[in-house]
Image (tube, rainbow, N blue to C red):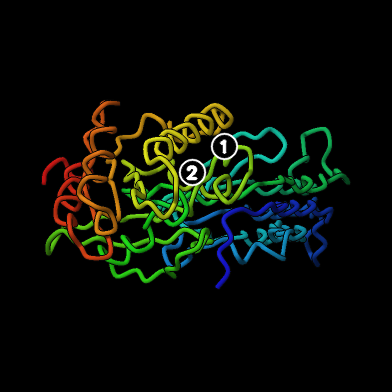
């Protein structure tokens, strides 16, 4: 199924029903008087969070949603029926953003609902306007008009740990080793085109969620590559695991790779400052040197010392063979739960 994490829609509340102009006319009732009822209230637009939904795919083609209108009042002081509320389901972690002002209206989490629009008020019937000096009013109010709102729905995945790094750094392989997730793995860039989520079980009670974020490249914050599409998904994470490929196949400097990704996080913070849920550059980080099975001991020592020189003590890992996995799992658990 296609993953869709952003959609733009128009929602409209229901119109209020008009009030009724009616007079009571019954045999043997000489003083009937007005008996027009009020119109019904228009339906609300309500967003709710559903855990069985993991994408905004249902909003890909249908862009306009409207609640039910209130019904007109009737005689014998009967009020019109209220319009049916419109309930729209979204995945956990969906932001509702006013498309006109860019204001975040709601951040919907599991079990929460949010009323985006209230239905129009129903009009008063002529009974409401009866006074001592006006015993037979022949006026009623129209119902209040519908309200409209253009919204941007933006899904930001909820995960405890975000895996970041250059394409082919080994993130998909790692998440397949530490969880039941089975993402595609290949030896070319951009194997992962959508974020993958995996649940890491710590014991019979505790577990945490890891998100494999598609590879970042320089200038991702400007829209280059895939990064700008998915950087937003790591705003909620409690920490990052920053995978650095130290194999010589890339012909890149691992330290420069690390600095390039850090620059993208800082640049994203600056360009999205007004809508950030959390600063990316300030998130705790575990730096992991991956693919240690593919380098000579001398190369490994050289790279490790370069990271020491910039004040970073990295963990060593081979996601393919599993070497270093227990230490990484313990470090992630400590960041999520505060204990190993």
Tell whether 204 sits left or right of 37: left
Q: Residues within 10 Å of mark 2 (few under 14, many from 20)?
A: some
Foreground residue among 76 and 285: 285
Coordinates of residue 93 in the picture (x, y in percent): 46, 50
Rendered image quadrant of residue 257:
top left
Coordinates of residue 205 in the picture (x, y in percent): 14, 60
Res. 174 in view? yes
Coordinates of residue 201 in the picture (x, y in percent): 20, 62
Q: Which residue is mark 2?
A: 107
In the rendered image, the vertical position of residue 124 relative to residue 270, given as above or below: below
Which residue of the protein is positioned furthest toward the right in this rendering? 138
Label 1 and label 2: CA atoms lie apart by: 8 Å
Assign a secondary structure to mark 1.
strand
| Residue at 21%, 35% in the rendered image | 313
Callouts 1 and 2 close, C-beta under 8 Å: yes
Which quarter of the image is occupied by the N terminus?
Answer: bottom right
Res. 127 in view? no
Coordinates of residue 218 in the picture (x, y in percent): 55, 40
| Residue at 41%, 47% in the rendered image | 165
Q: Which residue is mark 1?
A: 104
Tell whether 238 sits left or right of 30: left
| Residue at 81%, 44% in the rendered image | 141
Foreground residue among 245 and 92: 245
């Amino acid at each position: 199924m296609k993953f869709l994490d952003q959609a733009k829609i128009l929602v409209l509340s229901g119109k209020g029903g008009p009030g009724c102009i009616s007079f009571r006319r019954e045999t043997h009732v000489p003083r009937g008087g007005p008996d027009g009822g009020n119109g019904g209230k228009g339906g609300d637009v309500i967003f709710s969070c559903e855990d069985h939904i993991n994408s905004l795919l249902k909003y890909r083609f249908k862009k306009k949603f409207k609640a039910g209108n209130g019904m007109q009042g009737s005689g014998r002081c009967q009020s019109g029926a209220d319009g049916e509320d419109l309930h729209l389901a979204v995945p956990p972690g969906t932001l509702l953003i006013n498309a006109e002002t860019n204001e975040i209206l709601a951040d919907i989490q599991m079990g929460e609902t949010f009323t985006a629009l209230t239905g129009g008020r129903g009009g008063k019937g002529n009974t409401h306007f009866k006074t001592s000096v006006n015993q037979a009013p022949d006026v009623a109010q129209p119902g209040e008009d519908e309200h409209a709102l253009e919204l941007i729905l933006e899904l930001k995945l909820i995960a405890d740990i975000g895996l970041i790094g250059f394409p082919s750094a080994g993130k998909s392989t790692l998440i397949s080793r530490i969880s039941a997730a089975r993402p595609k793995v290949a030896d070319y860039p951009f194997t992962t085109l959508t974020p993958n989520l995996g649940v890491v079980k710590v014991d019979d009670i505790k577990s945490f969620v890891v998100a494999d974020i598609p590879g970042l490249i320089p200038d991702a914050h400007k829209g280059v590559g895939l990064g700008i599409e998915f950087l937003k998904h790591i705003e909620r994470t409690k920490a990052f695991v920053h995978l650095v490929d130290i194999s010589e196949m890339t012909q890149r400097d691992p330290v420069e790779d690390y600095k390039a990704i850090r620059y993208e996080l800082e640049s994203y913070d600056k360009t999205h400052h007004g809508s950030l849920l959390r600063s990316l550059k300030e998130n705790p980080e575990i730096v992991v040197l991956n693919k240690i099975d593919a380098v000579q001991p001398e190369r490994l020592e050289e790279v490790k010392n370069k990271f020491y020189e910039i004040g970073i003590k990295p963990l060593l890992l081979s996601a393919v063979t599993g070497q270093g996995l227990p230490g990484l799992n313990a470090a992630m658990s400590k960041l999520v739960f505060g204990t190993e």
